[in-house]
């Protein structure tokens, strides 16, 4: 059996390892679009903060880890998928040139990209580039940054996303003590970068979206305002996107009042979108991401999808959603690989889950944190000490929660929601005092 995995992030690597555990004889090829060793994007802020070196971002340690498991790693970009031919086409720019003779090409790829004693993938020369054949394909190409509609961002020197290791190297080289840095974005990705930049002792300005809110997709107004005040207390200056008209060389932030603010660095973190462009003309059904069934199959039987690119079942709503977080990607990968290799595991759905360290303030939200129609809400707020707990109920079940300023509730909240644990009389007790959530968990979850 020939398995090809497009994507060398957490989903791709975990899927490859799962396939190897389940099938010692199969051929596994992982195609990653970067020249780096497979790494975790979630570790990049720790690298910028100086808490880990580059190897600390790597998903697996040891240069021979994949080779020892007879997993081929090809560092190239996939240009298109051809389901009718069971092949993927690599971008011509990444193909070796001049092309070696066909009988030498498999050995050439093995030498160039590694793979230990694994059988090298079947590689055929195409006019567009190289093509690699598969029996089953997993698409795990992840996401890429989206850019706000601000002129000059794409062409100005000193503007970077914080998405790749190469981005992180540039940011680290510029963000020195006392430098002036603008961080565009106030969502999940931006907030995990704030702490890293503050640790470098920069003068940080955060550009909020038009609503002026922080993490609006994972927190309500109360929690978002609390995080904003916390960041301001840490010395972060706030501006809104509607006061910025463009960026020019310098870089210089052009303001709507006519001012021009020279800065040393602009970091853009205004959201992400799935990498689905390579599927154009493939016949694979896509919406916000690749539409999958409960077994991670696409509409084409031998093609699966996992991670940020997969639009699958949401545990709380029953709808098809994209959940672009690493824990979900890893869960996807294990289940998808199990089903690709002969299993029949039905996925229960991914839980909307966000755990965030926003400049040292721990926040998290789970499930239907906005509440459900006809449901009940209980909350406890301590503005002075930056603590907030909100619980959302549907009948006797906890279905969503927001938690700011505490870490001891994280596992409890997730367990009660994802375990669909009936609370019985504990619901009314929690309506009166949400802080008794640990007592409720110990009593109800152990029955």
Image (cartoon, grey):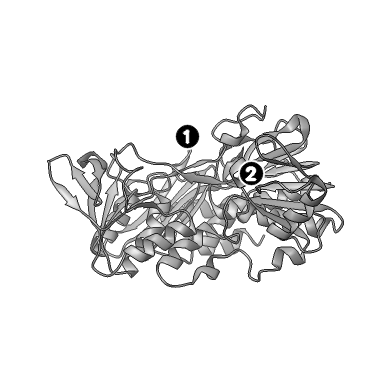
Give the SS element for disc 1. Answer: loop
Report whether residue 93 is seen. yes
Instruction: Identify whether 182 is placed above or below 409.
Output: above
Q: Is residue 210 above or below residue 444?
A: above
The quarter of the rendered structure image containing the C terminus is bottom right
Residue 157 in percent (x, y) is at 32, 51
Count of numbered marks: 2
Residue bearing the label numbered 1: 373
Q: Nearer the viewer, residue 388 or 242?
A: 242
**Measuring 81% from the left and 52% from the top, which residue is drawn there?**
27
Q: On the image, which quarter does residue 111 sit in?
A: bottom right
Q: Residue furthest left?
A: 258
User: In the image shown, does 219 or 145 lie closer to the viewer?
Assistant: 145
> Which of 199 and 67 lies nearest the eye of the viewer?
67
Q: Nearer the viewer, mark 2 or mark 1?
A: 2
User: Local crowd at mark 1 within 10 Å, few (<14), some, or many (≥20)?
Assistant: few
In the image, is 217 to the left or to the right of 438? left
Q: Secondary structure at mark 2?
A: loop
Callout 2–callout 1 Cβ contact below 8 Å: no
From the top left corner, tell me how far across and down residue 363 is, in percent: 41, 58
Specify which label sits upstream in the sequence, 2 or 1.
Answer: 2
The span from disc 2 to disc 1 (Cα, nearest Å) is 21 Å
In the rendered image, the vertical position of residue 187 relative to residue 285, given as above or below? below
Which quadrant of the view contains residue 62?
A: bottom right
Residue 176: mark? none
Q: Residue at x 48, y 67 (%)?
A: 408
**Which residue sits at x=62%, y=41%?**
92
Residue with the mark numbered 2? 349
Q: Nearer the viewer, residue 101 or 123?
A: 101
Where in the figure is residue 199, as x and y percent of width and height?
34, 69
Q: Residues within 10 Å of mark 2 (few under 14, many from 20)?
A: many
């Amino acid at each position: 059996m020939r398995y090809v995995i497009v994507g060398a992030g957490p989903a791709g690597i975990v899927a490859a390892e799962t396939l190897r555990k389940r099938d010692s004889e199969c051929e596994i090829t992982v195609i990653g679009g970067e020249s780096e060793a497979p790494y975790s994007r979630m570790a990049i802020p720790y690298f910028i903060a100086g808490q880990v070196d580059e190897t600390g971002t790597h998903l697996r340690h040891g240069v021979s880890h994949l080779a020892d498991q007879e997993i081929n790693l090809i560092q190239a970009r996939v240009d298109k998928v051809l389901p009718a031919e069971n092949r993927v086409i690599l971008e011509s720019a990444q193909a070796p040139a001049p092309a070696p003779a066909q009988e030498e090409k498999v050995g050439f790829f093995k030498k160039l990209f590694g793979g230990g004693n694994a059988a090298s993938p079947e590689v055929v020369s195409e006019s567009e580039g190289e093509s690699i054949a598969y029996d089953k394909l997993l698409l795990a190409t992840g996401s890429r940054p989206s850019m706000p509609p601000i002129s000059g961002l794409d062409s100005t020197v000193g503007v970077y996303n914080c998405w790749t290791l190469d981005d992180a190297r540039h940011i680290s080289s510029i963000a020195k003590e006392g430098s002036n840095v603008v961080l565009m974005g106030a969502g999940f990705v931006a907030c995990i970068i704030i702490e890293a930049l503050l640790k470098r002792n920069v003068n940080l300005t955060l550009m909020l979206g038009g609503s002026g809110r922080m993490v609006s997709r994972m927190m309500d107004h109360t929690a978002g305002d609390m995080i904003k005040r916390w960041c301001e207390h840490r010395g972060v200056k706030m501006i809104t996107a509607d006061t910025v008209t463009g960026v020019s060389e310098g870089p210089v932030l052009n303001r709507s009042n006519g001012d021009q603010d020279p800065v040393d660095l602009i970091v853009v973190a205004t959201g992400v979108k799935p990498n689905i462009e390579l599927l154009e003309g493939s016949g694979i059904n896509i919406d916000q991401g690749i539409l999958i069934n409960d077994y991670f199959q696409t509409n084409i039987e031998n093609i699966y999808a996992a991670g940020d690119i997969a639009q699958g079942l949401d545990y709380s709503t029953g709808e098809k959603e994209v959940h672009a977080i690493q824990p979900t990607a890893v869960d996807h990968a294990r289940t998808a690989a199990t089903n690709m290799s002969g299993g029949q595991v039905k996925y229960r759905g991914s839980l909307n889950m966000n755990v965030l360290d926003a400049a040292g303030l721990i926040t998290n939200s789970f499930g239907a944190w906005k509440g459900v129609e006809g449901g009940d809400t209980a909350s406890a707020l301590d503005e002075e000490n930056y603590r907030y707990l909100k619980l959302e109920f549907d009948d006797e079940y906890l279905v969503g929660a927001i938690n700011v300023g505490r870490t001891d509730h994280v596992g409890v909240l997730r367990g009660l929601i994802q375990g669909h644990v009936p609370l019985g009389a504990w619901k009314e007790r929690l309506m009166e005092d949400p802080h008794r959530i640990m007592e409720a968990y110990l009593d109800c979850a152990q029955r």
